Image: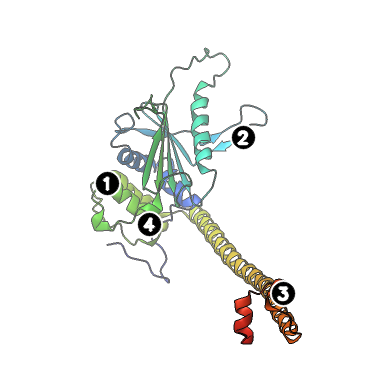
Amino acid sequence: MARSTGINSYPVYVDPFTDEGFKIIFGTEGKSEEILRGFLNELMKDNPAFGNIKKISFRPSVRNRQHKGEKTIIYDVLCETETHNRYIVEMQQEKNSNFLNRTMYYIARAIVDQGVTKKGEPEWKYEPLYPVVGVFLCDFHVPGLKKKLVTRCGNMDLDDKTCVGNHYREYYIQMPEFNKKPEECVTKLDQWIYILKHMPTLEIIPFDIKNDKALSQLDEVSRIAALTETRKRKYEAALREKRDRLAALDTAIADGRAEGFKKGRAEGIAEGRVEGRAEGRAEGRAEGKWEMAAGLIEMNVDLDTISKASGIPVPDLKSRFNLN
């Protein structure tokens, strides 16, 4: 079973939602290929155009600038299958209002790269154009997406909702939407998501993985004790960075709430003072009318004249001063 390691225990597995932890699991050439293949096959299981990957290899994760002023792109993981399909696998820890724009930009650049020819090569005429699939593991709800675990996007006919070509796909995995217990994980994809979500607090993987090459490899490469000292230091630095960032975020939220309360309280007091002054003026004006009416009554002025002068109805004057 999955168990918390406790506050005084050292974690068994790396946190995949740190930069270095993610690279250890999915981006280590010579070790992560089987993990990537297994995970992507489960994710693409219902899409025969992308699933059933037999072989996968890494491509350079840095996309260099082709023109002056152009942005350099660094993919978390960029890999290719035996059918030349390209996969971008990215991890995002924190909410970003432009995240959907960024993922589309990454996919577009991976498509455009296929048309870049070197000197002496024949002119590329939009063929072949291999599909590019972006897989984005998000530790938050993505602004602009419905709150569900996996959102699949692609080019489609807006009238009948059918796919138009296989040029690109986007798979967004929103981890907060996964709340299953180990016994409820009936599919392999459920097991993958459960492990990735709970990995920092697992002491063992709570599933039978001995006949699953990909999950067995995941279990092996993600153990902190198996890391080299150099990689362990990098991972610990990435973990500290994540904790510092989360602590700073919590502090900012707390400070914002305190400042908001303080400001709201001050505004409330000021508003109360304004309302109090207004009510005081209104009460003062009303009392002044009654005092004027009382003075006119003592002078034996008729009630109709007093009512016109003070604005107080005659019946109210009679009631207040017990007049017939």
Question: In the rendered structure, which disc, 4 or 1, sits on the residue that comes first in sequence?
Answer: 1
What percent of the width, then of the height, locates residue 65? 61, 30
Q: Quadrant of residue 315?
A: bottom right
Q: Amino acid at mark 2?
A: Lys
According to the picture, the residue beneath numbered tag 4 turns out to be 199
Q: Is residue 65 above or below residue 210?
A: above
According to the picture, the residue beneath numbered tag 1 turns out to be 188
Question: In the rendered structure, which disc, 2 or 4, sits on the residue that comes first in sequence?
Answer: 2
Q: Quadrant of residue 170?
A: top left
Residue 305, disc = 3
Q: Contact, CB < 8 Å: mark 4 with mark 1? A: no
Question: In the rendered structure, which disc, 3 or 2, sits on the residue that comes first in sequence?
Answer: 2
- For label 4, count other residues whose C-alpha is less than 10 Å away and answer few (under 14), some (14-19) or many (20+): many
What percent of the width, then of the height, locates residue 211? 23, 47
According to the picture, the residue beneath numbered tag 2 turns out to be 71
Q: Is residue 324 above or below residue 164?
A: below
